[in-house]
Image: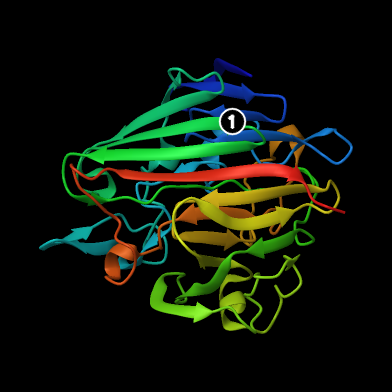
Amino acid sequence: MSVSITPFGKTTDGIPVQQVVLKNEKLEVQLLTYAAVIHKILVPDRKGHPVDVALGYQTVADYEINTDSMGAAVGRFANRIGGAQFPLYEEIIHVTVNQQGNCLHSGLHGFNRTVFDVEPTPGETDSVTMTAHSPDGTDGFPGNLDLEIQYKLVKSGLMIQYTATTDAPTVCNMTNHSYFNLNGHNSGTALGHRVCVDADAYLEADSTSVPTGRKLPVANTPMDFTEEKTLGLDIEADYPALKQAKGYDQCYIIRDSGLRHAAWVTGPQTGIRMEVLTTLPGMHLYSANYLDPETPGKDGAQYHPRDAVCLETEEFPDAPNHPDFPDTTVLPKTPYSSTTIYRFDIAPE
């Protein structure tokens, strides 16, 4: 087990960016301090050959130019806030509009555009902790927010633990926006991936992908992944949610609570299977419908729509505007915390 931290480059503003390598006998994970990005995940395939299963870019500048949050830590509030406003106690908070009248992924200055500090986690041999500060009023969000992300290898998995503290009431919803292709990051379409999601319902969304508040059952619809099926099997079905989003781009309501299983995904060519576990109530299943990078990816890869699948564990989108959704309010005495694990093995033949 080892941890190394080396220079990776600089942002266009001249801020140094570090590369972190976490390695054990099962996995190698490469991270960047720009946006706390997961840059590479090397996993052995069924023949024992290492395969990089995370899409990414070659340089810091490429991560800055592209707007897909590839591999990034996303917050203060991941996903959408409808109308770019929400009530917080007796006040209406107005945040930055950056997509179809809504606030997406916290506006223009979220953690997906921030350079983090990094240190080896004290007492750990396979972990680092990244930290960043979001000043009061950033994109309209109240409170000085301090975020800590611990990345740790746990046998054949990567554990991500988020903790956020504030000096004033605010909201928080953190996710990681990795694009996965378990056949290899540059292997083309992910529609043949086999997917199973532990969810009986998903959140209905309007034409701008903001939840309406309705929770719709997946049973007997193309949205049903309770039994394993290929990602592409029903993706072209004549079904409102799929037509509207050009594929899967919905928040699934994960059964139960606490740290529990949320999903399986398998790359058929390599046999690599990824399990997602989380403490969060939702998981956004996104079939990379709008993936259209401005620059080539790592190793000169050319990424196209549906060349990956995202499994973004999250609080419910637009939760501050829905009193019946799980509360995303964070107070000085009640910090935000969540855990997600991406765990890898070889699927049974």
Q: Identify the residue at image location x=77%, y=43%.
A: 186
Q: Identify the residue at image location x=64%, y=61%.
A: 287
In this picture, is 187 found above or below 290?
above
Q: Which amino acid does label 1 sit on?
A: Leu
Q: Answer left or right for 3 relative to 52.
A: left
Q: In which quarter of the image is residue 163?
A: top left
Task: Point out residue 173 in the picture as x, y percentages from the top left corner.
Answer: 37, 51
Q: In which quarter of the image is residue 297?
A: top right
How many numbered discs? Answer: 1
Q: Name the residue under label 1.
A: 153
Q: Answer left or right for 343 relative to 302.
A: left
Residue 313 in view here: yes
Task: Point out residue 135 in the picture as x, y percentages from the top left corner.
Answer: 24, 37
Which quadrant of the figure contains the C terminus? Answer: bottom right
Q: Quadrant of residue 220?
A: bottom right
Q: Answer left or right for 46 relative to 273.
A: right
Q: Nearer the viewer, residue 247 or 225?
A: 225
Task: Point out residue 345 in the picture as x, y percentages from the top left corner.
Answer: 74, 43
In this picture, is 318 found above or below 166?
below
Q: Which of 328 and 347 is in front in this view?
A: 347
